[in-house]
């Protein structure tokens, strides 16, 4: 999929823990200490109860394909079509990402297919979480 320069995310103080985690090969989420709500994207307060008592934890990195589109338009960073996917993690949150290691066709990108996170290093500071089909025999 990648061929050129991808846009590089710019961490903020609220998202730095997430980017530190991806650099270390971990997908990190936040959980409210008051109401136990798990959420993404990162923010300094719980979106459910507004508590500022939140914890960061390592997610499983497993999930399923909730929705996607296949982008057919050219982009300097990719060869051919690529998917823009909504991944529902086992922890219940959804995040946008790309599906890799899989043909970028409707026949291959099956809704609810099990996925696992993988990481692509862009710079010394930024590593992207991407998703691929769960390896055959992998526990979901």
Image (tube, rainbow, N blue to C red):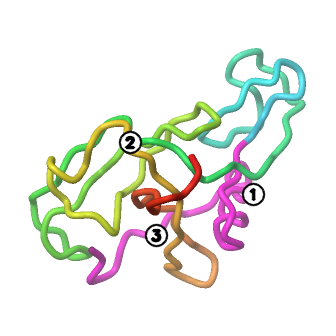
* Residue occupied by mark 2: 65
Q: Nearer the viewer, mark 2 or mark 3?
A: 2
Residue 9 x %, y %:
50, 63
Q: Which of marks 3 and 1 is nearer the N terminus?
A: 3
Q: Which of marks 2 and 3 is nearer the N terminus?
A: 3
Would you say the residues marked 1 and 2 are in contact, meaning their CB atoms lie under 8 Å apart? Answer: no
Q: How dense is the environment of label 1, judged by Cα within 10 Å: few (below 14), some, or many (20 and up)?
A: some
Question: Gap between marks 1 and 2, in whole Å?
Answer: 25 Å
Q: Which residue is drawn at 37% across and 44% down?
A: 113
Q: What stretch is highlighted in magenta?
A: 1-29
Q: Which of 90 and 119 is in front in this view?
A: 90
The label number, if any, that marks residue 8 in the structure image: 3
* Residue occupied by mark 1: 17
User: Per the image, is 138 magenta?
Assistant: no
Q: Which residue is drawn at 13% across and 70% down?
A: 80
Q: Residue at x 10, y 60 (%)?
A: 73
């Amino acid at each position: 999929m990648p061929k050129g320069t991808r846009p590089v995310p710019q961490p903020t103080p609220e998202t730095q823990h997430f980017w530190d985690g991806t650099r270390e090969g971990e997908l990190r989420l936040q959980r409210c200490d008051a109401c136990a709500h798990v959420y993404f994207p990162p923010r300094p307060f719980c979106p459910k109860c507004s508590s500022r008592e939140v914890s960061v934890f390592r997610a499983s990195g497993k999930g399923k394909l909730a929705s996607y589109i296949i982008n057919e338009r050219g982009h300097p960073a990719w060869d051919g079509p690529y998917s823009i996917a909504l991944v529902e993690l086992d922890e219940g949150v959804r995040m946008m990402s790309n599906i890799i290691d899989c043909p970028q066709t409707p026949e291959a990108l099956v809704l609810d297919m099990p996925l696992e996170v993988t990481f692509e290093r862009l710079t010394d500071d930024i590593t992207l979480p991407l998703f691929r089909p769960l390896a055959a025999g992998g526990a979901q």
